[in-house]
Image (cartoon, grey):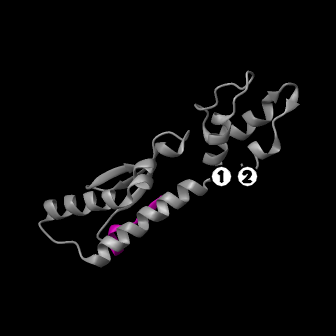
Amino acid sequence: MAYLRWGSSKWYVYACVNNYTSKDMQILMVCDIESFHYEELKEDLKACLDRCVLTYESQSKKVCAPSDIEELKLAMEEFISDTEEDPELTAIEKLKNTKHRDLPLIINLHRSELYKECLRLRFDGKDIPEELYLGL
Protein backbone atom coordinates (compact mmCIF):
# COMPACT_ATOMS: atom_id res chain seq x y z
CA MET A 1 0.00 0.00 0.00
CA ALA A 2 1.36 3.41 -0.93
CA TYR A 3 1.13 6.16 1.66
CA LEU A 4 2.74 8.84 -0.52
CA ARG A 5 3.46 8.94 -4.26
CA TRP A 6 5.89 11.01 -6.28
CA GLY A 7 3.29 12.79 -8.42
CA SER A 8 2.02 14.76 -5.45
CA SER A 9 4.88 14.40 -2.97
CA LYS A 10 8.64 14.58 -2.64
CA TRP A 11 8.47 11.07 -1.16
CA TYR A 12 7.40 7.67 -2.42
CA VAL A 13 6.41 5.76 0.72
CA TYR A 14 4.81 2.31 0.78
CA ALA A 15 4.27 -0.70 3.01
CA CYS A 16 6.13 -3.89 2.21
CA VAL A 17 5.15 -7.17 3.84
CA ASN A 18 8.14 -9.43 4.30
CA ASN A 19 6.13 -12.16 6.00
CA TYR A 20 2.60 -11.86 7.36
CA THR A 21 3.30 -13.46 10.73
CA SER A 22 4.03 -10.54 13.05
CA LYS A 23 3.75 -6.81 13.30
CA ASP A 24 7.52 -6.42 13.24
CA MET A 25 7.67 -8.08 9.81
CA GLN A 26 5.75 -5.12 8.38
CA ILE A 27 8.16 -2.74 6.67
CA LEU A 28 7.74 0.86 5.59
CA MET A 29 9.83 1.76 2.55
CA VAL A 30 10.83 5.34 1.79
CA CYS A 31 11.93 4.73 -1.78
CA ASP A 32 15.61 5.43 -2.52
CA ILE A 33 16.06 6.62 1.08
CA GLU A 34 15.44 4.11 3.91
CA SER A 35 13.31 1.21 5.10
CA PHE A 36 11.99 0.65 8.62
CA HIS A 37 10.41 -2.23 10.50
CA TYR A 38 7.24 -1.45 12.42
CA GLU A 39 8.90 -1.78 15.84
CA GLU A 40 11.74 0.53 14.84
CA LEU A 41 9.28 3.25 13.80
CA LYS A 42 7.12 2.74 16.87
CA GLU A 43 10.07 2.92 19.28
CA ASP A 44 11.69 6.05 17.82
CA LEU A 45 9.77 7.72 15.03
CA LYS A 46 11.79 10.93 15.35
CA ALA A 47 15.12 9.15 14.81
CA CYS A 48 13.69 7.36 11.74
CA LEU A 49 12.38 10.63 10.37
CA ASP A 50 15.73 12.34 10.99
CA ARG A 51 17.55 9.53 9.14
CA CYS A 52 15.30 9.99 6.11
CA VAL A 53 15.81 13.74 6.07
CA LEU A 54 19.59 13.44 6.43
CA THR A 55 19.80 10.82 3.69
CA TYR A 56 17.58 12.85 1.37
CA GLU A 57 19.54 16.05 1.97
CA SER A 58 22.91 14.36 1.47
CA GLN A 59 21.76 12.63 -1.74
CA SER A 60 19.94 15.57 -3.30
CA LYS A 61 22.07 18.41 -1.91
CA LYS A 62 18.78 20.17 -1.12
CA VAL A 63 17.21 21.11 2.21
CA CYS A 64 13.88 19.48 3.10
CA ALA A 65 11.05 21.92 3.63
CA PRO A 66 9.25 21.63 6.98
CA SER A 67 6.04 20.73 5.11
CA ASP A 68 7.82 17.80 3.40
CA ILE A 69 9.12 16.55 6.75
CA GLU A 70 5.64 16.80 8.29
CA GLU A 71 4.13 14.94 5.33
CA LEU A 72 6.61 12.08 5.80
CA LYS A 73 5.96 12.01 9.55
CA LEU A 74 2.21 11.71 8.95
CA ALA A 75 2.78 8.81 6.53
CA MET A 76 4.94 7.04 9.14
CA GLU A 77 2.28 7.55 11.82
CA GLU A 78 -0.43 6.23 9.49
CA PHE A 79 1.66 3.10 8.81
CA ILE A 80 2.09 2.51 12.56
CA SER A 81 -1.66 2.94 13.12
CA ASP A 82 -2.57 0.64 10.21
CA THR A 83 -0.24 -2.05 11.53
CA GLU A 84 -1.55 -1.81 15.09
CA GLU A 85 -5.19 -1.96 13.96
CA ASP A 86 -4.81 -4.82 11.47
CA PRO A 87 -7.27 -7.48 12.73
CA GLU A 88 -5.48 -10.37 11.02
CA LEU A 89 -2.12 -9.44 12.52
CA THR A 90 -3.77 -9.04 15.91
CA ALA A 91 -5.31 -12.52 15.64
CA ILE A 92 -1.97 -14.02 14.59
CA GLU A 93 -0.21 -12.34 17.52
CA LYS A 94 -2.84 -13.72 19.93
CA LEU A 95 -2.47 -17.23 18.53
CA LYS A 96 1.33 -17.07 18.69
CA ASN A 97 1.16 -15.99 22.32
CA THR A 98 -1.31 -18.74 23.28
CA LYS A 99 0.35 -21.47 25.29
CA HIS A 100 -1.26 -24.84 24.75
CA ARG A 101 0.11 -28.33 24.19
CA ASP A 102 -2.18 -29.03 21.21
CA LEU A 103 -1.65 -25.72 19.44
CA PRO A 104 0.30 -26.31 16.21
CA LEU A 105 2.76 -23.76 14.89
CA ILE A 106 0.72 -21.31 12.89
CA ILE A 107 3.35 -18.69 12.21
CA ASN A 108 4.05 -19.92 8.69
CA LEU A 109 0.44 -19.93 7.54
CA HIS A 110 -0.53 -17.50 4.85
CA ARG A 111 -3.15 -15.10 6.20
CA SER A 112 -5.86 -16.34 3.87
CA GLU A 113 -5.54 -19.80 5.42
CA LEU A 114 -5.59 -18.62 9.03
CA TYR A 115 -9.35 -18.67 9.47
CA LYS A 116 -9.63 -22.23 8.14
CA GLU A 117 -6.84 -23.31 10.46
CA CYS A 118 -8.54 -21.66 13.45
CA LEU A 119 -11.69 -23.64 12.77
CA ARG A 120 -9.68 -26.89 12.71
CA LEU A 121 -7.85 -26.38 16.01
CA ARG A 122 -9.12 -27.81 19.27
CA PHE A 123 -8.42 -26.92 22.87
CA ASP A 124 -8.84 -29.99 25.09
CA GLY A 125 -11.74 -31.17 22.95
CA LYS A 126 -13.35 -27.73 22.84
CA ASP A 127 -13.47 -25.31 19.94
CA ILE A 128 -11.05 -22.40 19.92
CA PRO A 129 -12.36 -19.53 22.05
CA GLU A 130 -14.29 -17.17 19.80
CA GLU A 131 -12.23 -14.11 20.80
CA LEU A 132 -9.12 -15.63 19.20
CA TYR A 133 -10.52 -15.58 15.72
CA LEU A 134 -13.10 -12.80 15.78
CA GLY A 135 -12.43 -10.18 13.19
CA LEU A 136 -10.87 -12.51 10.61
Q: Quadrant of residue 117?
A: top right
Q: Residues within 10 Å of mark 2 (few under 14, many from 20)?
A: few
The answer to whether the residues at label 2 and label 1 have Cβ atoms under 8 Å apart is: yes
80 to the left or right of 87: left
Most distant residue in the front direction: 43
Where are the magenta residues, as a range?
A: 1-8
Residue at 79% over, 30% down: 120
Across and down, in percent, residue 11 comes to 31, 66
Q: Secondary structure at mark 2?
A: loop
Q: Residues within 10 Å of mark 1 (few under 14, many from 20)?
A: some
Q: Position of residue 87 (x, y in %)?
A: 65, 52
Up-down: is 56 above or below 18? below
Residue 48 covered by magenta stretch: no
Mark linked to residue 30: none
The CA distance from mark 2 to mark 1 is 6 Å
Residue occupying image coordinates x 47% and y 42%: 25
**Lower sequence index among marks 2 and 1:** 1
Determine whether 65 is above or below 76 in the image.
below
Residue 135's spot in the image, x, y percent?
Answer: 73, 52
> How far across and down, in percent of the image, does residue 116 sit?
75, 37
| Left or right, 46 with reference to 24 | left
Residue topped by disc 2: 135
Q: Is residue 79 visible?
A: yes
7 or 59: nearer the viewer: 59
**Residue 87's mark?**
1
Q: Amino acid at mark 1?
A: Pro
Q: Residue at x 71, y 48 (%)?
A: 136
Q: In this rendering, does residue 9 appear at all?
A: no
Q: Amino acid at mark 2?
A: Gly
